[in-house]
Each structure stands twice: as structure tokens, then as C-alpha cells.
Image (tube, rainbow, N blue to C red):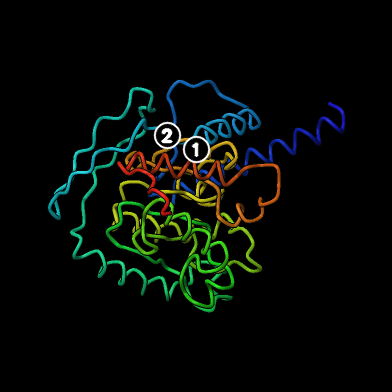
Amino acid sequence: MTPDEASAAAAELRDIVQVVRENLLWQAASGVVGVPRARNVRRLGAVDQAQEAGAAARRAPVLEPAEAPEERPLELGRARQEPAAPAHEPAAREVTAVVRVAPGKRLALLAELAEEVKGCTKCALHAGRTQTVFSRGNPSAELMIVGEGPGAEEDAQGEPFVGPAGQLLDRMVGAMGYERDEVYIANIVKCRPPNNRTPQVEEMAACLPYLHKQIEIVSPRVMLAMGNTAVRGLLGVSEGIMRLRGKWKLYKGRIPVMPTYHPAYLLRAEGTKRDAKREAWDDLKAVMGALGRSAPTKKG
């Protein structure tokens, strides 16, 4: 093997290890313990093992439901039996029964969780925050929107999506026929990363259990994942938003998720050849269709 080939192989191995590491951290944050191991599998070298593990990580759960499931209200404490997993779903995955939280209790449970988040020191982000940024919107919303993390204005005000990107998001929500706070909005991480950088894997893993609890309490019918970080945090996939947007996925085998562009990207893309806003609008229309809604007619 030449030095160039050895260098390329080492770089590929590092990439594979990083993919495996991110996938395992996501699984740990989602409550998965251990890695399943098939019986009677031939013994592999270290490089082959890493390559196979990397391929498995890239095949992380990415299901595509044809439409949003019908929502049936249930009493607190009774589990809704979800439909059987589609035939194309890997046998190792299980569709989790949902315990519905009574609407009257959701606000109190979210307030209690927000207080817990205020005192969180699980990762280094807490050292630079002004305050935590938990959520905004309706705790009984049928639509939940997940973003990346707070920026400077969100850190100052303690509310997600209040800067220029937030103003665009409000217009997008309005175009779908919702009032600003009729949907529920949260982020992957609750503290601002320095200089608004992308949250690191360890920071996401530390904060994701809070988001999982928010989703459990709100029990949205559909979720919008805005941007790469939101998609990776919710689904544990490594593909970029350019490839994933517009394609239905499932969160924990039960809640339809539509990946789309982050409003900040839409602002940056203005004036370029890519018609990102039109693509995002197509994604929003798909969500409206899944929820049985139609685009509001323009006045005048």
C-alpha cells in the first residue's frame, strides 16, 4: 500500500468511526442500550468491522409513511396501540405504544421540565448561556417544529425563533393557516453554542432527553425538522438536509417527521439560483395535507 493509499484509508476509517460514534450517542439518548450482535457471523478484521458498523449506522431508522396516522384521543394512563410496523421496516425496530397525557396536565408537566432545564449543567454550553431557551407555543399542538438551538437574540429573550429567522418562521406558520403560538416550537439544544456554531455531538446527546420528554408530553400528530441538526437529533441519520428534505420519516416509529430547510438557510439562500423557499413551501404543503388542512386563500 502506498503512503497516499494508506492516508486515504485512514481518513475513511476516521469518517466511519465518527458515523458510528454519532449513531451510538443518538441511540443512547433515545434509550437504546447495547448493540445487537448476530450469531454465527464470520470473524472480521478491525477495518472490516468498522466498515460494516459504519454501513449499519448509515442505515439508521429512516422510514417513510405514506400519510400521517389517524389521531384518536385516549384517557390518561391508557396506551394507544399503534398499527403494525410496515413490511419494509427492519424487524429489530419496535413501534412504541404511546401514553397520551391529558391536555390539562401538559402545561404543568412542561413547566416542571423547563425548571429542570434551567439548572442543567450536563454539557459545557451551560457556562456561556444567559438563560436556557425551552420552547414556545401550544402544549397541545398538532404540529411541533424542531430547530437547532438558540442564537444571540433567543439567548437574551429566553424564547426560540425570535430573531430574523424566527420572523420568517412566523410567516411560514401563518402561510399554513396557524397563528404564531398555535404550534409548539423547541430546539435540539436549550443553550446557545458559542458564536452560534453547530452543536457538538456530546452537547446534543446531553440535551436530547429533554426534547424527547417534550415530544412525549405534547404528543404532536406531525413534526417539522428544520435543518441538518434537527434531523440528525430527531432521527439519528447522517444524510444532509439537501437529500432528506421533502421525504417523510418517522420519529421512534410512530410520529411522521418532515425534514425541511431551516429559516436561517432560507434567508441566506435569497438571491441565489436555488429556489429554496419554493421547496420549503412544498414541504409545508405536504405537512398540511397530512394534517387534513389546505393552504389558506390569500385575501384581496
Residue kind at label 2, given as amino acid type: Pro
The residue where tag 2 is placed is 36
Residue 69: x %, y % from top left: 28, 37
Residue visible at 55% across and 55% down in the picture: 263
Residue 25 appears anywhere in the view = no
Residue 123 appears anywhere in the view = yes
Foreground of the two, 187 or 245: 245
Image quadrant of residue 184? bottom left
Foreground of the two, 144 or 75: 144
- Eyeballing the image, is 293 above or below 247? below
The residue where tag 1 is placed is 246
Q: Quadrant of the C terminus?
A: bottom left
The residues tagged by marks 2 and 1 sit, at their Cα atoms, a distance apart of 31 Å
Residue kind at label 1, given as amino acid type: Gly
Instruction: Determine whether label 2 and label 1 are within 8 Å by CB.
Output: no
Q: Secondary structure at mark 1?
A: loop
Foreground of the two, 38 or 169: 169
Q: Quadrant of the N terminus?
A: top right
Residue 163: x %, y % from top left: 55, 68
Residue lying at the far right of the rendered structure: 3
Residue visible at 50% across and 46% down in the picture: 231
Q: Earlier in the sequence, mark 2 or mark 1?
A: 2
- Eyeballing the image, is 189 above or below 271? below
Q: How many marks?
A: 2
Is residue 52 rendered to the left or right of residue 295? right
Is residue 88 rendered to the left or right of residue 59? left
